[in-house]
Amino acid sequence: MINNLLSAAVFCLLCLASTAIADSTQNLGEAASGNPAISAADCVNGSAGGLSCNNVNLWSQIALDEFSSDPQHANDIWGFYDLNTEREYALIGLRNGVAIVDVSNPSAPVEIDTVAGASSTWRDIKVYQFFDETSQRFRAYAYVTTDASNIGLRLIDLSTLPHTVGGSVAISPELRAHNVYITNLDYTTGLAVDGVPPVLYTAGSDLSGGRIRAYALDVPTVLTLAAAAPTGGDSHDLSSVTIRDARINQCPGATNYCVVLIDANEDSFQIWDATNPANPFRLSLTSYAGLGYVHSAWFTRDGRYAFVQDELDELDFGGNTRLRIFDMSNLAQPVLAETWTGAEAAIDHNGFVRGNRYYLANYTRGLTILDISNPVQPAESGFLDTFSAHNLATFDGAWGVYPYLPSGNLLLSDINSGLFVLQDQTLDSPQGTFSIAATSGASEGSALQLAVSRSGGASGAVSVAWDTQPGSASTLDYVSGAGVLSWADGESADKVISISLTADGLSEDPERFFVRLYQPEGGATITPPDVASVFISDAGAPSSMGFVAAAQQVGERDTLAIVMVNRRGSAEGALSVQYQTVDNSATSGTDYTALSGQLDWAGGDATARSIEIPVLADNVAEGDEDFQVILSAPGGGVLTIDIANVTIRNVANSAPTANAGFSQTIREGVTVVLDGSNSADPDGDLITFAWVQTVGPAVTLNNPDSAITSFVAPQVNASVTFNFQLTVTDIFGVSSSAITAVTVTNTVSGGGGGGGSSGAPMLIFLLSVTLVIRWQMRPAADI
């Protein structure tokens, strides 16, 4: 009986240990990376390029092995809309840094730069953008935290785009932190909300016991500590909402608004009045039945509800994805209003609200989109499964999603498969969709009329809220406003927003502010454009156009030379100009692709224009070369800088470095893994792999054109050495090789033995191993 019990216990412990090992491996994000990228595909009959889907199209993917840093996995993601260039970017956290990817053309994303960093499974990224009066342009910074590393909160200057970014600089006393968050920002533009200063928070750092720490952003490159939370445990993630309704009476620090911060605190979530960041006040601490690990949360736009992600409930208690929705009417006592249960067992990770959709990074299920027209009755409206192996409760697949780009395109980071750019097709509704013109303008001293349309359906009574947001124009230049537009059942005519523009008597270029649509009601949705750029012009000022810079440089491997053209003077009236490239020392067809065309602006539009010129890498040792871009035939205005000189910096190609891994001694019958993933190209170019056997009896290599290959060691009568050569080749056909040796030994039978109590030490040993593994799996940082 004892032996039977011991056998059963050992078997169960082996199962537990193997499960723990598997989960620990997934926790470290080491599951298969290097899956090939999938080409653009619409979701048709439940499939987009072989990925299961519904109402979500695939624009593009950058697989992990297509990034220049050759990361082993990806983690979090954020987006950036550059108001200087109108270009859209993905900022994706990688095992070894942060990659900045231009996704302005969603079907052809381009890696612009990668800022290297310490090796870590966990990174978090947020972006703050503001108008710099001194330079008269927008500046932007990405703030990056890294857990399990001692490199501090890092700052990356994004203001030097579109060709490069500034290197990262440590700007806070923290050595590590799990998450970073900035309150009071518009998530599309990264600009501060009207009249409310932004505050940067760290969560789960090595200081203040892991509690939240608040930093003022008065000088964005020099953080000033406002306060650390006076109570509470280790914080994991944060989000906030600024409320102006009757609930401000529940906030001791409220003025005419209250900044409500939700702190996902692992074993609870805490609600803080963070209106005064130097004196935060905890309003409540909430737990719930079936709690595993409170990972993150996000508010609806009006702050009436909070969606809470628990990262361990599916794993610990079984069942399918569970997303909890809390009623936040009473900030001192949030009430669980509903628990949405998904179709699969996948774990919920990070989620975000835009309009009446909830975008959920759902680990092995990929992206899940919920219709939250009624927040307490969510319904799945779409998904795309980026991890096709299974939909079980493991830590593989989608880590984060960013749904706030002006284009409406979605950015998703997948631990195993890199970056996905997706298209949301869930927004059609019989109640209609709301949108607003992307650009408009008028002269100062006038009243601007902005039309908001309801299209695609007119069933039922619906409404949408709007407000204004400063940009380069402040509230001294226009009368800020907010309101709600309503349509009756069957009504579809446009509604008008009227905004007064102030005459300040100053001579200046067009100034810009924004009008945002949000909070659709009645089942209607919001479709891009939902943020309008409004340009205020001096009355009677002439229009002009010209290059932003008369000279610029690009690298031969930069893929694109992006030359910017600005409209100045007045934004009123239509404008056009023609452009063409002209050879200098650089030759079209060899060094770059010749281009010509016309740029057009409608009346009221003063957004920048890009001329994208493909740069060709020829792998020829040569000096720098240049060509020109020339503007001509202006229509509706005059030219300023009409010639831009583009220099292509040539750097000689370097051969890649092959690394075939260590030599091994293996017993016959064992699967042998040959790992060439540490091979690299010093120029950051993509490389291909080719394994061949050079010595020993012939064996069959699995996937010999991948970084990692394998074979089964054959039976041998005595030790036999096998040699394998790995050749890596860059995009120019330059190669290098390395050899590794595998010695296969004959299996030697071992003696049996032992009865008695020998099972007890083994049981203790397995218990110890299992406990150690489970301890390593604990969610001390992210999972």
Image (cartoon, rainbow, N blue to C red):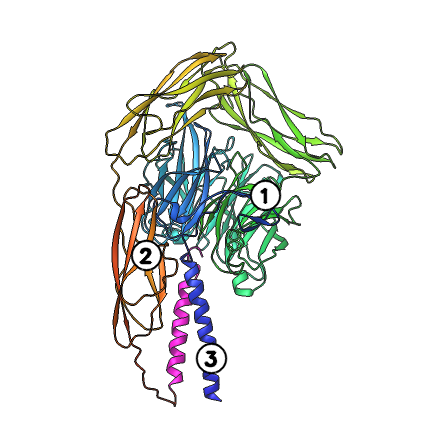
742 versus 180 height, above or below: below
Main SS class of the magenta portion in the image: helix
Label 3: which residue?
A: 9
Q: Is residue 500 above or below residue 492?
A: above
Front-lying residue, 628 or 364: 628
Asked which secondary structure carries label 2, the reply is: strand
Amino acid carrying label 3: it is Ala
* Structural crowding at the residue carrying mark 1, measured as other residues with C-alpha within 10 Å and reported as few (<14), some (14–19) or many (≥20): many
Assign a secondary structure to mark 1.
loop
Kindly identify which residue carries mark 1. 300
Q: Would you place residue 36 above or below residue 694 in this image? A: above
Residue lying at 40% horizontally and 67% vertically, measured from the top left: 773
Disc 2 versus disc 3: nearer the observer: 2
Q: Which residue is mark 2?
A: 691
- Name the amino acid type tagged 1: Thr
**C-beta proximity under 8 Å, tags 2 and 1:** no
Find the magenta span and give its range.
758-783
